[in-house]
Image (cartoon, grey):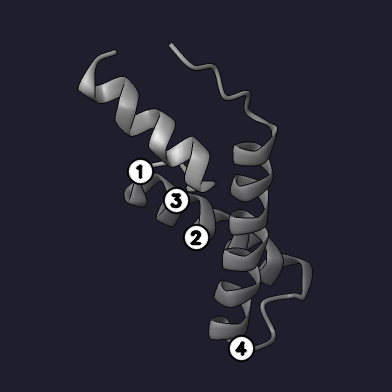
Amino acid sequence: MSEENQEVQHHQVAGESQVPAEARYCMIAEAAYFIAERSGFEGDCEAYWLAAECEIDRMLGAAAVDSPFIPD
């Protein structure tokens, strides 16, 4: 088994996301924008960000749980 495969499997076992930090950040930023848009951009920017962060992390966590763990 290659070292890269072991690292991927480690993340799958640990339930960690395989999404790079930059991609996660972009996903959160986009989600925060749409949350703010739904409220007419009248509210707390930090609250929008935190809500988006929870939503994206929940989505990524669900994707990690749903992905099959296939040993070599």
Discs 1/4, front: 1
Front position in the image: 41 or 13: 13
User: Height in image: 23 above or below 3?
Assistant: below
Count of numbered circles in the view? 4
Q: Which dot marks residue 20?
A: 1
Residue 39 position by quadrant: bottom right
Element carrying mark 1: loop
Q: Mark 2 to mark 1: distance in Å?
A: 14 Å
Q: Are marks 4 and 2 in contact (CB under 8 Å)?
A: no
| Residue 8, image x, y percentages | 38, 30
Q: Disc 3, disc 1: CB below 8 Å?
A: yes
Question: Which residue is drawn at the image coordinates 63% and 66% (left, top)?
Answer: 54
Q: Which one is earlier in the sequence, the residue at label 3 or at label 2?
A: 3
Q: Residue at x 42, y 30 (%)?
A: 9
Q: Which mark is residue 29?
A: 2
Q: What residue did someone put label 3 on? A: 24
- Callout 1 crowding tier (Cα within 10 Å): few <14, some 14–19, many ≥20: few
